């Protein structure tokens, strides 16, 4: 990256599954997963976003995520600016799940920083 290029922001999107998801009948869970998939694709398609990786700890953490740590899953990405992080978080407000929106079933918090460079 040249010195003229703007620095990317490293973003960690921390996602928690809410109790409303677990209260759904089994026949309605697929609709939430479709919306969740659309949200993940939406983040990856935002201009200037490079998804670096994801982590889902649903096999070792069962049930809802409490307020704060630990979260259910994470998306780490390089993003061009804070507005992009806001747009990614807004996908939880805007992605439809039937008559509701995704934020009824999941919450998100974006942590913004910079790449931690490991010295040689």
Image: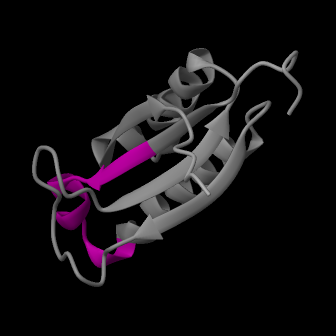
Query: In the rendered view of the protein, which quadrant contains the N terminus?
Result: top right
Q: Position of residue 48 (x, y in %)?
A: 79, 32
Q: Residue at x 58, y 24 (%)?
A: 87
In the image, residue 93 sits, relative to residue 16, either above or below, namely above
**Above or below, 110 relative to 22:** above
Is 16 inside the magenta-drawn segment?
A: yes
Which region of the structure is painted magenta? 13-27
Q: Is residue 74 above or below residue 102?
A: below
For residue 82, what is the image quadrant?
top right
Tell me where residue 88 appears, x and y as whole percent: 56, 33
28 over 75 or under it: above or below: below
Image coordinates for residue 16, horizontal then vertical, percent: 28, 52
Q: Position of residue 93 (x, y in %)?
A: 44, 30
Residue 64, located in which quarter of the rendered image? bottom left
Identified at 65% across, 56% down, the residue is 52
Residue at coordinates 41% horizontally, 70% vertically from top-left? 56
Is 114 or 58 nearer to us in this picture? 114
Tell which residue pokes out farthest to the left in this image. Answer: 66
Q: How many marks?
A: 0
Quadrant where the C terminus sits is bottom right
Between 118 and 79, the residue placed more toward the observer is 118
- Looking at this rendering, what residue extends furthest in the bottom direction? 59
With 64 as the anchor, is 92 left or right in this view? right
For the rendered model, the colour scheme is: one colour
Say whether residue 7 is left or right of residue 63: right
Query: Dividing the picture into quarters, in which one does residue 22 lie?
Result: bottom left
Nearer to us in this view, 64 or 30: 64
Residue 49 is inside the magenta segment: no
The answer to whether 68 appears left or right of 93 in the picture is left
Q: Residue at x 30, y 84 (%)?
A: 59
């Amino acid at each position: 990256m040249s010195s003229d290029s703007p620095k990317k922001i490293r973003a960690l999107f921390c996602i928690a599954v809410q109790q409303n998801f677990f209260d759904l009948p089994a026949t309605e869970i697929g609709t939430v997963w479709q919306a969740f998939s659309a949200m993940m694709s939406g983040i990856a398609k935002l201009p200037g976003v490079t998804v670096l990786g994801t982590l889902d700890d649903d096999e070792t953490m069962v049930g809802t995520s409490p307020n704060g740590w630990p979260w259910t899953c994470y998306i780490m990405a390089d993003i061009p600016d804070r507005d992009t992080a806001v747009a990614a978080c807004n996908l939880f407000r805007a992605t439809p799940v039937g008559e509701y929106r995704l934020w009824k079933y999941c919450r998100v918090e974006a942590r913004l920083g910079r790449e931690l460079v490991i010295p040689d």
